[in-house]
Image (tube, rainbow, N blue to C red):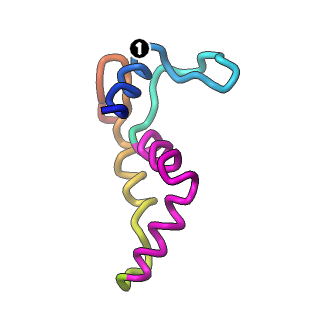
Amino acid sequence: MKIEKGIKRYLKNGYRMARGVKTKKEMKLGDLVEKIIRKITFGYGKTMAKSVAKLFGYEDCGCDKRQEKLNKYIITKDGIKKL
């Protein structure tokens, strides 16, 4: 629920940098998911995913592939658009 509110607030106000300067009003979906995962896992998302993948016998966690696939979509004020 909080993620949906964050996305709605992002679409309404645009992306803001640390100093409150608006820079852009669109973002790639893969980058947004990566930022959310990084915040939830305190910056250890990829490390944890790679460890779990190795535990189950995989060479790679698939994080980069997922991000590339999702980056084909852009979130704008009008909704999600495909590149």
In the rendered image, residue 33 lying in the magenta stretch gets the answer: yes
Tell me what residue is drawn at x 35 percent, y 51 percent.
69
Judging depth in this view, the residue of 1 and 52 nearest the camera is: 1
Find residue 23 and report its image quarter: top right
Q: Residue furthest bottom?
A: 57
Tell me what residue is drawn at x 58 percent, y 53 percent.
43
Tell me what residue is drawn at x 43 percent, y 37 percent.
28
Q: Is 56 left, or right, of 23 in this rendering?
A: left
Point out residue 9 in the picture as x, y percentages from the top left corner: 41, 19
Vertical order, 18 against 31 (above or below) = above
Q: Is 51 left, or right, of 56 in this rendering?
A: right
Image quarter hosting the N terminus: top left
Image quarter hosting the C terminus: top left
Label 1: which residue?
Answer: 12
In this picture, which residue range is highlighted in magenta? 30-55
Judging depth in this view, the residue of 16 and 44 nearest the camera is: 44
